[in-house]
């Protein structure tokens, strides 16, 4: 079978490194270009040293000509939010206009939020491409599998939102009365990128946990709310992210103040039904609960459900690998769906 | 100045090891006996190897004769909850009866809860010493300094309760209207003891976080509620503990659903006023927040305050060293208060 | 293509867990039985929770009848050294005798050492199956690929020996004059197993490194010496192992006192030539050196070469994942060679 | 008793932060100035957040006037090697010239090496202050206590050299015949400073170990050789440093090829005799060996001794806290000796 060809823009990022790892073992896809202006000319395996023996090519500079992508079937965009929004948009529109058939999977936040003013508020960037927001499909396969199948542009979800939405969607969709959703999220340090900063040096990360953007300041908040509000009107969440001393993974412990009685076992049935066709969601059987280590290196989202009867509070524990199900793995899952490959090809 | 003499029962525990370290550098106290039946005869520094060069004595067996404690001014009890309750009680009552003047600081939970039925419910142990519960003073110096001064028996608080009560007391004491307190707590692995178990092996702790006793099942819950309820009638909390991949420290992120408007800066003033005489509580100035690493190795409790105006939720972040302010350090602080030593002697 | 069937004895070990993970994604192999007497009846994914969503079967008890293995093409033995030597030997001999054609890959040390007296000295166990030592092929594919192809019994190498032999073989094979080989080895805590002990609790592993079996006391020493002595008469090494605060991986820094001049670049050429057909050995280009993190999760052995001209000392740095190239991955690589599958099938 | 006053130049470094912590609890010393041009005006506890509640002052700019130090008895210099050599030298010479009586403890390498050409070779910096090298005393109290007592300028040793010299000095001093010293050293990440870089980000440090400056390239090599050569002519060592995934501490495993027979117990007696008056050196009793965790937070150097009789190799294991005995603690120890304070004041 002929392989499709894939290119990655922003290939110096961690997410891109994992994309290359998954593509290298994908039986239907071949990596064509790894674009990174900052690293052009460097061997990929010299910069991402864990790809030694796995990826044997050099980073290339992206130029206008490449933007036509006549040699790439699918293009992954793994660049920072906002800064390259206009360039990405022009590129995508160009491919659509020329009917190249190229498919785009954007790992940034640029096409996730449907309301331009919400995007502009949280990201402090002007968004002049509202038209593409209709084209873009929010790439959470457990909710939008059918739309993803025929999408030209997939907006790959954020890491925290993936974990939060998957853990709350069945609950919200069932219209169980509640008042207050409090998401306590802990992310591994890979979430802080590989550019050295006070946020990611070992002296500040090891033997430590710190909260950041506390009090409704994290830009993933509106993304969680947008998607949950599709199930029920205007869901609001209190979202508190932290950096924890592990490299990969997210654990979220979410408290929901219940206004009606519902048992953990009833909820577990609801969740199992909701995700019965989802290859990558595991509802953990009581009395066990998800742990970070069990999802690291995988594309799984593991979800556990408890109810505190003393305070009538639902306590959800959910875990993903932030770089895999929260980024590169989910991007490959989306590609697999778009091209009718096995949903877990390259992700086993 | 003549030093007072101190003995420790249950000296093989981590808390006891830290007690010995603090006493070794305390200018007013001398360690007399380190009792441990399981380690009797072993050099203390061979078992607690980080005390090499610091403590030069052997563990001894505790027998009935020793229970008279005619050579100890103060006795620290650092044994497991419940199992030794009767023995501790008889020992304390004996000393009181004989008017030995011995003072006791018990690091277990056995004398913390004022309501015997609550203790029996949460610890699954019968409590036949209700009389001692009136004698016992809850040893949180920031709340009960005066009572501690003249106490014969101090019930040294639990680690999670110390962190939770200190972070919530000023808020509750000010009667700010609210509905729902959600405490998300993460403890270092020292909280799981040094007896090898699935809970504390590195393979299950490193690069991981796991929740445990979720859904109102942790025995520290009633201790938090008892103390906060002293400020306002019948406070209830949803408490979710986790083990995190660091050795020492606790971080608690607490969400309180507010029913009235109050700003973070107003609250910060209230907290600063409440703790203005407290040597060991730091209210962290905005925009900073407490981090685990800043309290490790110290007797400090650091507290940070934010308000999420979108959801009208108070978000408190509080940190302590679980073995120091959460156990051994607080025990020494209590001793210092009982004997009118400098409050931070041995704890600098 | 019809899959072959594989069974694992001692399936509760870490190595076995990784074997199951690799077999689950292997296109030519199907897992038939996961034998563990201690865990019989437990779902595999409940005990090895990181196999949730990957392995859906229960542990079984191994009994005499199973020993015939008429439904297994290949049997992996992942049990402790010595204790099950007799049982393994009878089982293997039985299969040979009955001409079942079953192939065995033993991850223990029981069939690695060719000299029974050496085995008995280092393992303090009597070895009554010298005949099988001739049958057994030492399963280091980079040295014994041809022998492995037709082996009935492969003795899968130890983790430290794999790393040490691969890093030293080309040097020794080239008969460069030297006097003294000093191997400083650091292993992740997975090497200490998952049975809770003082050696593997987080309190003793995190923020720590400790040496053990120092001074020629580690049983992997004779294994390293046996294999290197095949290239040159009676090689001796000073081997010092340590436990380091990471979960997976080994890094060895080996100093060899040189008696003749040789440059790092000459050696690098020798090594590249030696391993030119080896899929899983990377000679790291100067000035870079291997790091643990780059091999974790892979079947690679990465080797770096420096020479200290001031002291005329060769310094080799070599890294593997102790559970993969040092155990389960190498076992799968051996199976792939035995069955003419792609050498990296299941290991990508 | 009147306290002496101390000032610190280069107060934004980790070593300086620990100096401030130790001075804050020192009964004979008061911190006068914390100089840091880059952080001038910032509260010390805001930059070094673990000093919250401990140090309550601001960083100041160092200017020429301050260089007279008429208000400081002792000045700690904690600045990078080479860059400030001229400024330090002029400052020290000025104080000597004006007979201010100021004492200086320099934590950089600028006055450690007695041979200017060796310094210039290893540090690639011109050294125009050879006269001060005679004034400077190498501040390893276990070797130079008498000289330190009356020193005006103490060159505080490097972290690796402290650990290496203490572990090898008794052996070398006893003229035991040998041929080859191989020091394998692992340092916590604090040794890589707190300025964000690829060397100290958690993604490159956690779950990893990497060697650096391999092959006789680390500038601490000549410092080790200079000091050991005082005991025996021209000692040479092969020194291989690594960064390990812990924050604080050094462990060195040193192999010495012996040319005569000597037992571990004989050596242990020699070491105990050598260090019998040393408050901060512990010779660990067999069969135990030093571990990093036991020295972290202390000023101890722990040393363990084994002999591999198979290869006639001495194996030494030695541990210190790199920032304490390897920098700030040793500086305070030196100050204590210079001022006849208790040697462990501030260091308990």
Image (tube, coloured by chain):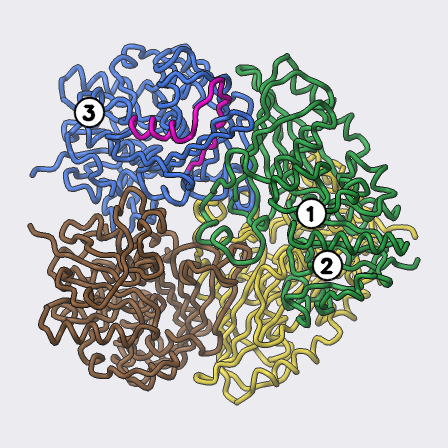
Chain colours: A brown, B yellow, C blue, D green
The magenta region covers C250-274
In the rendered image, residue B39, in percent from the top left (x then y), is placed at 66, 36
Q: Residue at x 22, y 68 (%)?
A: A64
In the rendered image, residue A333, in percent from the top left (x then y), is placed at 21, 60
According to the picture, the residue beneath numbered tag 2 turns out to be: D9
The Cα–Cα distance between marks 3 and 1, rounded to whole angstroms, is 59 Å
SS state under label 2? strand
Q: Nearer the viewer, residue C88 or C199?
A: C199
Q: Residue at x 23, y 69 (%)?
A: A139
In the rendered image, residue A321, in percent from the top left (x then y), is placed at 34, 58
Q: Nearer the viewer, residue A263 or B130?
A: A263
Based on the displayed image, in which of its 4 quarters is residue A61 positioned?
Answer: bottom left
According to the picture, the residue beneath numbered tag 3 turns out to be: C103
| Chain on which label 3 sits | C
- Depth check, mark 1 against mark 2: the one in front is 2
| Chain on which label 1 sits | D
C299 w.r.t. B1: above or below: above
SS state under label 1? helix
Outermost residue on the bottom side: it is: B261
Earlier in the chain: of badge 1 and badge 2, it is 2
> Dot 2, how many residues are within 10 Å of its Cα: few (below 14), some (14-19), or many (20+)?
many
In the rendered image, residue A178, in percent from the top left (x then y), is placed at 36, 80
In the image, is C120 to the left or to the right of B41? Answer: left
Based on the displayed image, in which of its 4 quarters is residue C20 positioned?
Answer: top left
A38 w.r.t. C304: above or below: below
Q: Nearer the viewer, residue B212 or C201?
A: C201
């Amino acid at each position: 079978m002929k392989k499709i060809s894939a290119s990655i823009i922003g290939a110096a990022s961690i997410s891109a490194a994992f994309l290359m790892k998954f593509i290298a073992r994908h039986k239907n896809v071949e990596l064509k270009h790894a674009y990174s202006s900052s690293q052009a000319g460097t061997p990929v395996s010299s910069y991402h040293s864990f790809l030694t023996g796995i990826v044997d090519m050099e980073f290339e500079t992206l130029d206008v000509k490449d933007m036509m992508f006549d040699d790439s079937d699918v293009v992954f965009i793994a660049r920072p939010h906002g800064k390259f929004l206009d360039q990405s948009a022009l590129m995508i529109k160009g491919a659509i206009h020329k009917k190249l058939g190229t498919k785009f999977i954007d790992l940034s936040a640029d096409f996730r939020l449907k309301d331009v003013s919400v995007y502009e508020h949280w990201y402090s960037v002007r968004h002049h491409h509202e038209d593409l927001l209709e084209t873009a499909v929010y790439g959470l396969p457990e909710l939008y599998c059918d739309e993803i199948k025929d999408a030209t542009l997939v907006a790959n979800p954020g890491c925290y939102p993936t974990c939060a939405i998957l853990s709350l969607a069945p609950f919200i969709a069932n219209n169980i009365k509640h008042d207050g959703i409090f998401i306590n999220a802990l992310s591994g340090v890979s979430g802080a990128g590989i550019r050295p900063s006070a946020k990611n040096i070992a002296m500040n990360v090891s033997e430590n946990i710190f909260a950041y953007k506390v009090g409704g300041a994290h830009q993933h908040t509106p993304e969680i709310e947008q998607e949950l509000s599709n199930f029920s009107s205007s869901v609001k969440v209190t979202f508190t992210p932290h950096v924890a001393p592990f490299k990969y993974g997210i654990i979220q412990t979410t408290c929901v103040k219940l206004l009606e009685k519902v048992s953990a076992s009833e909820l577990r049935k609801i969740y199992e039904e909701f995700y019965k066709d989802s290859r990558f969601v595991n509802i953990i059987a009581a009395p066990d609960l998800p742990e970070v280590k069990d999802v690291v290196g995988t594309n799984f989202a593991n979800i556990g459900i408890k109810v505190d009867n003393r305070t009538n509070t639902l306590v959800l524990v959910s875990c993903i690998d932030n770089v895999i199900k929260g980024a590169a793995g989910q991007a490959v899952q989306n590609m697999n769906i778009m091209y009718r490959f096995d949903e877990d090809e390259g992700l086993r």
